[in-house]
Image (spheres, rainbow, N blue to C red):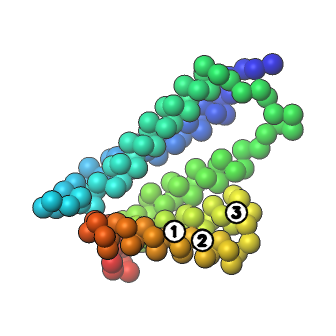
Amino acid sequence: MRRVSWGDLGLSAGFAAMGLVWIAGAREMPMWERETPGPGWLPLAFGVLLVGLSAAAALQALIWPAAAPEGGGSVRKPLLVLGATLAAVLGLELIGFLPAVFLMLLVLFVLAERKALLPSLLAALGVSAALHLIFVTWLGVPLPAGPFGG
């Protein structure tokens, strides 16, 4: 039997709320500096995407409900993802964009996906380095640097 999952709707609402936090935080930062995107542009884009994707997921849960899982489903992984993402958003200004994203990815790889520590460290470092290369080096986007500089 298919029925609407209140857990799916709650998770969508949680991610939408997080997107609104990103959007609200971005409003306090400059969007453009001369002809390049400012530090508020990326959080605004992430926030808008998160709200939009959350709305799409909620709509999908309402229109095409999934069959109930046989094992009773666990909320551990969705809560870890939600918590790690929220911590990264809240830590942007405190520790900077790159350390916040690195720590979020590391937590997700090790705790949510249960990957080994060394490959998780390398993957989180690689993604963080790629983000720095693309946004800071190539595009000149000044990301929140935190106390570690940037």
- Look at the image and tell me whether residue 144 can be seen: no
**Given the current orientation, which residue lies at the most extreme right position?**
71
Residue 147 placed where, x, y %? 36, 78
- Determine the residue located farthest toward the bottom in the rendered image: 148
Residue in view at x 28 percent, y 61 percent = 39
Residue where numbered disc 1 is placed: 127
- For the residues labelled 2 and 3, say whether their Cβ atoms are less than 8 Å apart: no
User: Of the residues shown, which amino acid type is indicated by label 1?
Assistant: Val
- Count of picture labels: 3
Disc assigned to residue 123: 2
Alpha carbon distance from label 2 to label 1 = 6 Å
Q: Is residue 19 left or right of residue 135?
A: right
C-alpha span from label 2 to label 3: 14 Å
Task: Identify which residue is drawn at 81% across, 33% down.
Answer: 69
Above or below, comparing residue 36 to residue 125 in the picture = above
SS class, disc 3: helix
- Res. 111 mark: 3
Residue 122 place in picture, x, y as percent: 61, 76
